[in-house]
Amino acid sequence: MEHEWLIRSGAFVAILISMLAWEFVVPLHHGRESRLRHDARNLAVLLLDSLTVRLVLPILPVGLAQLATERNWGLFNHLPLAPWLSVGLTIVAFDLAIYLQHLTFHAVPVLWRLHMVHHSDLQFDATTGVRFHPIEIALSAGVKLGLVLILGPPAVGVMVFEILLNASSLFNHANARLLLSLDRWLRWIIVTPDMHRVHHSADRPETNSNFGFNLPWWDRVFRTYRDQPRAGHGEMIIGLEHLRNPHHLTLGRLLVMPFLGTGGVYPMIRPRDDG
């Protein structure tokens, strides 16, 4: 799709700046680490993610969706769907796929080792929403490519989903205060920072809850929803209990983290001898 990269990049930068401003005005927590150093590291991970996807994959989901439409591939191209309906179904179907993918990365130990790079952040803010190991991002892109081949969604629907996913990831990781009354209403429509912050608790049952990124419905449907952290948002511990040393969370350490040490107690599927 023409100008796809420019549209997505522009939307990402605008939303990131908005979230950083929100966090500056009404922060919920004050981190122990320099904000500049912390954010620079997470954004460096994002840059490596983007380069990895470009190098590893011959085509991206939006481009494949356009090709699928031209060649009549996939379910949607064989159904009499109105354009607005096919875009809506694309967003919902892709969001469900990302929820299930997220759940799988918590369930399977080898995948959790990749995903714990995201959870190892000792601070919870908008840039945490882009802190994912490059291999995880490449696997996620592969899942979306497979879904494009199965569904044959419109390219504009895939692009809108990608923008929404990036926007919601920045929003629901924001270290900002949201009125409780507003949060209670919003979390029926979108995953809010208070809802997703529970997922970044160092407490294992809380880590393995609230897997949604954009639409909040899947956690309620599949019974993975947790309303609030037991210790409260002010006292809950962010991160992972076995990765508390900031000196072990440098950019280089994050890249090799899946291949060293342990995944801790967090994978949902654990060997019998783990207890």
Image (tube, rainbow, N blue to C red):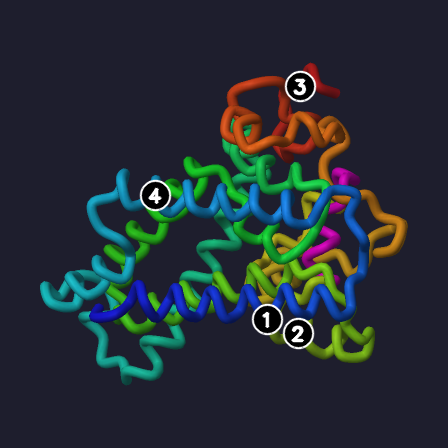
**Residue that extends furthest to the left in the rendered view of this protein:** 71
Q: Earlier in the sequence, mark 2 or mark 1?
A: 1
Q: Earlier in the sequence, mark 3 or mark 2?
A: 2
Q: Amino acid at mark 2?
A: Trp
Image-based side of 181 in relation to 35, left or right: right
The residue indicated by pointer 3 is 272
Q: What is the magenta range?
A: 194-205
Q: State the SS at label 3.
A: helix
Q: Amino acid at mark 3?
A: Arg
Q: Of the residues tagged 2 and 1, which is closer to the observer?
A: 1
Q: Earlier in the sequence, mark 4 or mark 1?
A: 1
Q: Position of residue 235 (x, y in %)?
A: 89, 50
Look at 76% across and 74% down and name the residue there. 184
| Cα separation between marks 4 and 1 | 25 Å
Look at 29% across and 51% down and name the residue there. 145
Q: Position of residue 11 (x, y in %)?
A: 44, 70
Secondary structure mostly taken by the magenta-highlighted segment of the chain: helix
Residue 198 in the magenta stretch? The answer is: yes
Look at 48% across and 59% down and name the residue there. 96
Q: Earlier in the sequence, mark 3 or mark 4?
A: 4
Check the image and report above or below for 98 versus 75. Answer: above
The residue indicated by pointer 4 is 51
Q: Position of residue 141 (x, y in %)?
A: 36, 48
The residue indicated by pointer 1 is 18
Q: Earlier in the sequence, mark 2 or mark 4?
A: 4
Q: State the SS at label 2.
A: loop
| Residue placed most toward the observer, 139 or 28 | 28
Check the image and report above or below for 130 versus 160. Answer: above
| Cα separation between marks 1 and 3 | 46 Å
Q: Residues within 10 Å of mark 2 (few under 14, many from 20)?
A: few
